[in-house]
Amino acid sequence: MHPKCKKWVKSKEIFWILIDIALAVAVFYAAVYLLRKGSIHYREASQRALGIVAGLPLVLRPRRRATAPELLVHDILVLLSASSFALLLTEYVVKGGILIGNVQIWQGYLAHAAVFGLLYLFIGSIRLTTCIGMGLTMLYALVDHYVTVFRGTPVLFSDLFAVGTAKNVAANYSAPVEWSVLITVGIALLFCVAVCRVRRPPTPRRCQFIGCSLLLCSWLYGLGLVGNSFGFWQGNLEYSEWYYFCRTAENAMIEKPSGYSEEVLQEIAAQYPGEQGTAQPNLIVVMNESFADLQDVGHFETNADYMPFLRSLAGQQSTVTGDLYVSTFGGGTATTEFEVLTGDTAAFLPYGSSPYQMYVKNATPALVSGLAEQGYQTVSLHPYRATSWNRQQVYERFGFDMQLYEDDFGEDDTERVRSYISDSADYYKIFEVYRQKKPGQPLFMFNVTMQNHGGYVPDETDNFEQSIHLTGEYEGKYPEVDEYLSLVKRSDEALEELISYFASVDEPTAIIFFGDHQPNVPSAFFDEILGDTGTEDGIARAEKKMVTPFLIWANYDIGVQQDVKLSANYLMAYALDVLGCATSGYDQMRLSVCEQVPIINRNGCQLADGSWQNVSDVASDGLDVYRQAQYAHLFDAKKRVDAWYEP
């Protein structure tokens, strides 16, 4: 070779050696950057181990003529390093590196390691495994990040069944390209390039199989050391994101309750035959989007009352007011909807499941079909897209005669607040349906409003005036809360219009009004108003974010009750009973259980003595009966007696 060529080749080799060194140094500093974020920074034992594992394969590189065992060892080091970066990047972009403790860190690490180990088993190439595995990690991490930003809760297995709804809702949000996102993607690419630049021959396939076996044994041993503990009522801040997703996903399978049989169902039906009522009022059920009284969570001051009309109804004639406990926070409207319309509770379903997408697959006898059998006209109204939460199909299976959506409102003359149809315009559609119904035929209207839907950042496109704002120590600190409370004030004014209209009609009419969940405003605001309660029970504290107001109002005498507390699954059975309507055997059974367990939701349950418990820890004959009846309702159409579930 010509001397000049030799010199050029040598210069080229030196250049690439310098590039490799630069990549290794950059990866090292990237790992240090991630390890100094959030609570991981204060877990020295885990921090040190993750840092060492992250950098080893770029320091301990195999020789050019490395033996098969040497190559295998390097493959394992790369997989362990990739798992470390996958954990750190995911936790960084989703929640700033916050993990509650060392156990949770290593639970998450092993969950990521399992993914890379499985990919290595099927792909073989360590470079391809790294690139594909890191690509999947980035896809999950970024989806989880933006779902958390928009909804306030992480992505769950059930979200895979709600892609259509996610597309609809996402159209009303903007996805900001944040520095954390750019840094995360940049570090992932940097790591992949650094691994691909390691010059070495491929590992023989037989050694790869040995490596996978070693990884599997190590994974199982590691899981045995750190444990697989998991509390469903705890949020994702308690666990790594991927581990949290996997643990909720593995509970998507429904098992038959202990002792379940057709004979048991017959005994339950005989014990609870239902009650014959005499009243058949028009039933206007309004589930108001994100409507909540945040004073139920903790104290704060505002320039004016944001729900004066609703508060004025407490203690009024023919009115029941109180608190409704739901099973979802910041989103998941259809879960509350499901509990109210079916009487089933999400407490008996897998955490993170979405009943509308996963369980309502056929005609489901319940409130709607029962009222239709009684001669009611049954109408659903949702002033948004029909594809959200699979509602069209679910409503058909529930037995609604008519479904109304956004397209059924006028395009030009319909009032909107922000981009959504206002509560006031929504209620005018209820008035229209009422006026057009057959004279003398009772109406059942189930209305899911849209005005207060999430996305509370004020901007110049807002088409309503903010009338409420925080004062005192929080003034000017949370503009999203100011926006939300101003929306609630508009809802309160519209509620007064709704009740005023039906107060003047001649037909007996009842309004059941409630919020579906609390809003997704900044979590820091909730943290501040909740405060540090020290010894307060964990479930009781979590339940404060699961409360919304409810009321039952009628234009005929139903007595007066206030400060009633119950959960969404009991609401319609309770309302039918208060209003003097017929109730089903399933309603009667739930009202009996309500006396023992007044509140039950995904977080836990409250017993009659006021104590909060995990549902699994409560020994209750009533809950056992409830679980059996609900299983038949959702999963065993052959054994259930449809009429027993219909009022």
Image (cartoon, helix red, strand yellow):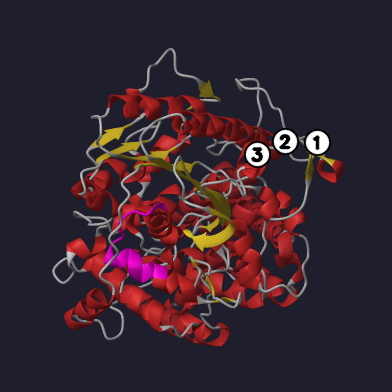
Q: Which residues are magenta?
A: 579-591
Specify the farthest residue to the right: 472
Label the magenta part by its dominant secondary structure: helix
Q: Which residue is mark 2?
A: 479
Task: Verify whether residue 583 appears in magenta.
Answer: yes
**Res. 503 in view:** yes
Q: Which residue is mark 1?
A: 476
Q: Secondary structure at mark 3?
A: loop
Q: How many neighbours does mark 2 have within 10 angstroms: few (below 14), some (14-19), or many (20 or more)?
A: some
Q: Which residue is mark 3?
A: 307
Up-down relation of residue 510 to residue 406 (above or below): below
Front residue of 62 and 439: 439
Can you give x and y, in whole percent of width and height, for residue 204 in the image? 35, 73
* Type of amino acid under label 3: Met
State the residue at coordinates (72%, 32%): 468
Front residue of 102 and 306: 306
Q: Is residue 207 left or right of residue 53?
A: left
* Type of amino acid under label 1: Gly
